[in-house]
Image (cartoon, coloured by chain):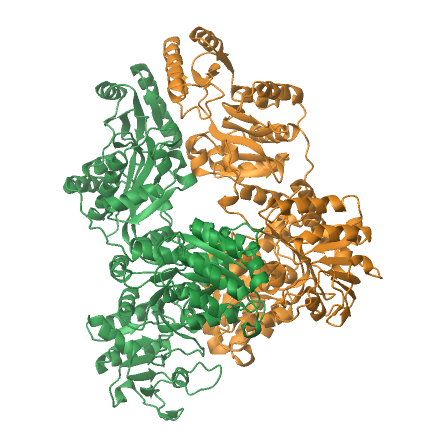
Chain colours: A orange, B green
């Protein structure tokens, strides 16, 4: 794999050119060269500065072209206007790896920055030179003392690989990630991005856990395909920032407004086995969790506690994180009852304090933990204990006791929550012993165990099911309808949208377009009463809002009245609306209304949206997303993870809906989105899920007019 | 206020008897006397143990009755069987304050524990003796070196008062609460509880913030009334544990199953101005927030950051916590643009790093922070900066700079997020300076600012509106209907429930009970078609599930068919059901279905439930709670805080509902619950909210048969 050899030049360079090295040294000067020497780098360094001379005892070359040895990695820290020229020189020298630290390119406000960004991209195209940055602190490799940052910092060496878009994840890696092995700040990603770095770290022997700090992503589909290969081998944790609404794009349809980018990222991560970290303060303990524990087979947690109050907090956190308090076996209960005072109730949480106070806390900790870990009903244990005093002279210090017992049960995580002012010292001692993790809080402990279980139960064992495209779709027919609409410059296809989804095999209500009351009468007679009337106008987006829908028409007399009323309402709502006529549909009322649609996402391409339909869609937002296409299993997952699944399953006196039929519709909608990239947005709302079959009652489709 | 003098004997005792003192001393012996001496207590101590002699240089009295001086506080740590007798002696000695450390009373599994608990309660009744505990570590007063705990620990003195139900909140107070002034562990609360302690701390000059750690609560109404007095004077933060479903009671109606106890606690706290802390790890920083900042006037946050990536994280956290990113004024933008490099975009977040690197980080920090704090569009600032190195020799240390500027704007919180391995040292230096708080993460900083804003915007200024009971309610009539139902041993009143709510002035659909098809025909003719038929049986709880509802009956022919069908369905559903007949109702379809009900809560008494009605009630759980009664303003708040408010306001082509009429129904339901405690549960579902007026279509009421 070529990119691995390539990234090795960045991560393990034998020689580094530091271009634009400053002559100022000392605190506050942000000198890359000084920092590199301080980090203990053992390779050859070639400082470059047009003024020449020497800095920090090293000869300074006036130009990168003057360097008389082989350069693995060039680090550019010149003023931004000089950068494109220096990159050009690097390509001419055949330097394979270039880090551009300088800011002010695609991150800048001005046009000059964007033009220089493009110039760099053009310069390296077709050469052997690859770029990390600009706007980066570059590379940190704590295994080999490589560090291209300009800011002084310390970290702790750990088997964690970080790919980030902000230097703070590397400079503050001890705080954010609990330590660092290899870090790559990809900055503006003018060239090298997440996919290559993730693949490199996946193959790197010293890396056990991969962290991504992601602000944006290009080529999302290639990234997801790579992630599907990596995640069963190593856990990939992502801190996706920029999740607030400021980032959400303006959109003009239901699916568009619902598919906020953040929910799409979450769906994409889940589909490719990436674990999303919702809170930056949890990342360090999550890394330690994945480094320490090799397995977690179920969600049943036992709690062994020095304090009843702490036990209650831990059970709260357990429930909040979707795990379950274990039901201890009778054997375990009996064994614990033999240790505890007679008056105590034995259960989970097991409060060992009264026994510990009477018989010795260390002894009781060992006895109880061993019984609990041996219980077949227990998948993991949380020990809540105190750090009131320095562990060196704390009579309640049970670190060795817990580690000794925990080591006997390597497939059942023994987690520890130490509370009290000395908990940091306790955490360090547990970290050094590498058997159990001491967490900062029960919330954090249970959050991490839940992610560990997610990894072992779903991701690690996952066999990604092969997608099979539905057979009987009419691609040409669907494309022709859209092309005709685009020919007429229609912004939003409406009744034609029903024709498009019908071409892809999604069942659509029987209907016809009437342009006079007489035509409507004829259609209604053909379809049979009752019927529904709906205004057909590409200028009226939300028909109900415009009074453009009348349901349950039972006779010709009612129909003629309704026809007139709808026309009046439509013109009152929007006098200049182009009216195509009135859609006459069979009236169907039995069934549950869902929404099914999708859109082209800038990062991930075609994305499916599914959820509760009808008037509640935007109010309740009971929706879910997937990157299309989806397999039948994934479609079923979508259905099951919404609240409205309970209605479809027959809750509250409803007839159960046809889930198989709905799965089919979702798979077909995914195929439609993938086959026809000229669809910007489409949704069926409502799609009626009946006891037998589904029926699209209304749809909208927004074609892409851009080149 | 008598209880203040009383609690002073606990918190500031001049003399303490330690009863049941152990002769074993040293680490691991948990000797209360040794701990008390080590804490530096300056008053008189009287050790008591039947064996007499001396311990730690103090004379040991054989009985509390032998003590020859005045005892302010007795601390009992004898075996549990001895406790009731010792309490008796204390009452006889006229000791006003007793702490019972011993475990094994109402916390025990066995009957003996509960009996001894009751014996203690009986012993002190009518005496001057008051008890804290049993099952407690008692009292900690760091201002006066009072400490009745048996476990060694250290804390930091701070103006925080803690009332808790687990000793860990005091022993680990530095970790949980950031420090401690006065702590009272009320344990099993056989006597003194939250209310008295909260009132005491509210009046204590050295306490600025009150923390409650609550596992359960007795006499919730008295507590809430007290909290309404206290919260405008001092912030009260509560960590309510035991919030997971294990604690939720089994319930048999909609309102019952929805009113999980935890949501009721949340409603009660909100109604009385108590701030709920959702995560124990946030408590310490929240305390520091309330100690440090005196005001926060709005939710507009500016971000000044050393790192663009950190700025994005902070904006995410801002949005997540319901605050807003400030829009900086043109003047501020211009001023910042004059400092920043030309190529940079100036906005919020303001990334000061490029300017700082070029011109000096400290200087730029001062300039930018001053401009931002002066901006009228800014209510608070978060400064994101680094703690990569020890602040003592970190060229990026801007602690003094930030404090100097922040001190000039005392009504605008300047919050700091320091990231990097030395952030704890930074936090300490900020804490010592008492101007700004350094938070552990942006999530924590914005969470705390949001709570601070909540306090200053709603609680501190709050004038609790006076409740006015609705006038035209028929108490006697409602009571008679329920009494009649109870006379017939009906578990759940159904059609009679509509009569009860009608007696309280809630509009109910026109209706009548038919026991033959002929009666039904007559009723339908009187009411006018269309009508709805509903089975009337106290044995059929969910009518729709049983096929017991047929709507939209338009003729006598349809009605007779429907009558038979409903009878058949009901008997098929439950062959032994007692059928009262069939309810014939006017058919009303226009309007939004809501649920309105309530129940008797074990802690808080009558509790109201309101939310989305119809088949979605239990699926979507768009519901809210209040302790009854409620004012019209509170009723309006309930309506506005549910999702379904958008439907009632006329979203998606619906006609707007009669909000004033709905407010009236909610207030009346509250009055009904308060006036008739014999109602265990009641709900109207659906209550139809029409464009003019509301109409109850169906209701259930569960009477209380217990004494």
Q: Position of residue B281 (x, y in %)?
A: 46, 63
Could you say which is closer to the camera, residue B220 or residue B342? B342
Q: Is residue A348 visible?
A: no
Q: Quadrant of the C terminus of chain A?
A: top right
Q: Position of residue A608 (x, y in %)?
A: 58, 34
Residue closest to the eye, A172 or B26: A172
Q: Nearer the viewer, residue A21 or B613?
A: A21
Q: Residue at x 60, y 72 (%)?
A: A429
- Residue B512 in which image quadrant: top left
Q: Please indicate, yes or no, whether residue B707 appears anywhere in the rendered image.
A: yes
Q: Residue furthest front?
A: A51
Above or below: residue B540 compared with residue B25: above
Give residue A591's position: percent from left, percent from top: 47, 26
Image coordinates of residue A4 in percent, x first then y, are 77, 52
Return the residue nearer the eye: A449 or A487: A487
Please indicate whether residue B4 sits to the left or right of residue A606 in the image. left
Residue sitting at x 40%, y 40%: B618
Residue located at (41% from left, 79% from top): B150
Q: Horizontally, is B119 left or right of B158 in the view?
A: left
User: Residue at horizontal 59%, vertical 62%?
Assistant: B357
Tell me how many marks there are. Answer: 0
């Amino acid at each position: 794999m070529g990119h691995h050899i390539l990234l090795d030049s960045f991560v393990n360079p034998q020689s580094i050119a530091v271009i634009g090295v400053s002559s100022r040294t000392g605190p506050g000067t942000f000198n890359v060269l000084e920092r590199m020497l301080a980090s203990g780098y053992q390779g050859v360094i070639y400082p470059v500065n047009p003024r020449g001379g020497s800095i920090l005892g090293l000869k300074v070359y006036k130009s990168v072209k003057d360097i008389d040895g082989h350069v693995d990695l060039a680090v550019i820290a010149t003023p931004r206007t000089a950068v494109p020229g220096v990159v050009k020189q690097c390509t001419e020298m055949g330097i394979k790896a270039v880090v551009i630290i300088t800011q002010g390119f695609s991150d800048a406000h001005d046009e000059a920055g964007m033009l220089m960004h493009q110039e760099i991209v053009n310069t390296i195209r077709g050469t052997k030179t690859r770029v990390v940055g600009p706007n980066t602190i570059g590379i940190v490799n704590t295994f080999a003392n490589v560090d291209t940052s300009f800011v002084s910092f310390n970290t702790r060496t750990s088997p964690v690989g970080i790919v980030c878009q902000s230097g703070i994840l590397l400079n503050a890696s001890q705080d954010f990630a609990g330590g660092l092995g290899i870090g790559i700040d990809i900055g503006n990603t003018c060239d090298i991005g997440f996919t290559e770095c993730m693949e490199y770290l996946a193959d790197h022997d010293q890396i056990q856990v991969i962290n991504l700090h992601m602000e944006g992503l290009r080529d999302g589909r290639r990234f997801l395909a790579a992630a599907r290969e990596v995640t069963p081998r190593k856990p990939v944790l992502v801190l996706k920032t920029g999740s607030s609404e400021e980032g959400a794009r303006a959109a003009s349809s239901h699916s568009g407004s619902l598919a906020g980018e953040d929910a799409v990222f979450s769906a994409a991560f889940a589909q490719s086995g990436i674990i999303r970290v919702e809170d930056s303060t949890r990342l360090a303990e999550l890394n330690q969790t994945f480094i320490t524990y090799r397995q977690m087979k179920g969600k049943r947690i036992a709690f062994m506690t020095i304090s009843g109050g702490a036990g209650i907090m831990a059970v709260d956190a357990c429930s909040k994180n979707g795990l379950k308090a274990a039901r201890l076996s009778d054997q375990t209960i009996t064994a614990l009852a033999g240790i505890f005072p007679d008056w105590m109730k034995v259960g989970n949480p097991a409060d060992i304090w009264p026994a510990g106070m009477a018989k010795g806390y260390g002894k009781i900790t060992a006895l109880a933990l061993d019984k609990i870990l041996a219980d077949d009903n227990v998948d993991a244990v949380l020990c809540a204990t105190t750090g009131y005093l320095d562990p060196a002279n704390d009579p309640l210090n049970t670190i060795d006791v817990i580690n000794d017992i925990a080591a006997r049960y390597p497939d059942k995580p023994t987690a520890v929550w130490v509370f009290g002012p000395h908990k940091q010292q306790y955490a360090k001692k547990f970290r050094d012993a590498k058997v159990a993790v001491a967490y900062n809080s029960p919330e954090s402990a249970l959050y991490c165990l839940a992610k560990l279980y997610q990894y072992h139960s779903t991701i690690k064992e996952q066999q990604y099911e092969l997608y099979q495209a539905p057979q009987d779709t009419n691609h040409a027919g669907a494309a022709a309808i859209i092309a005709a609409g685009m020919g007429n410059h229609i912004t939003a296809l409406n009744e034609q949208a029903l024709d498009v989804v019908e071409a892809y095999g999604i069942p659509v209500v029987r209907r016809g377009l009437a342009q006079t009351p007489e035509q409507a009468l004829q259609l209604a007679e053909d379809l049979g009463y009752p019927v529904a009337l709906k205004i057909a106008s590409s200028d009226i987006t939300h028909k109900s809002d415009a009074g453009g829908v009348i349901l349950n028409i039972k006779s010709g007399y009612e129909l003629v009245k309704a026809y007139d009323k709808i026309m009046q309402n439509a013109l009152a709502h929007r006098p200049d609306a182009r009216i195509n006529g009135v859609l006459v549909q069979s009236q169907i009322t039995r069934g549950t209304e869902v929404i099914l649609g999708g859109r082209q996402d800038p990062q991930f391409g075609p994305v499916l949206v599914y959820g509760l339909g009808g008037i509640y869609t935007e109010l309740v937002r009971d929706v879910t997303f997937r990157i299309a296409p989806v397999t039948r299993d994934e479609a079923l997952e979508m259905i099951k993870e919404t609240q409205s699944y309970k209605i479809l399953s027959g809750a509250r006196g409803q007839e159960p809906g046809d889930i198989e039929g709905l799965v089919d519709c979702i798979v077909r909608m995914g195929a439609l989105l993938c086959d026809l990239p000229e669809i910007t947005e489409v949704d069926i709302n409502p799609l009626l899920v009946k006891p037998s079959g589904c029926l699209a009652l209304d749809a909208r489709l927004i074609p892409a007019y851009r080149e």
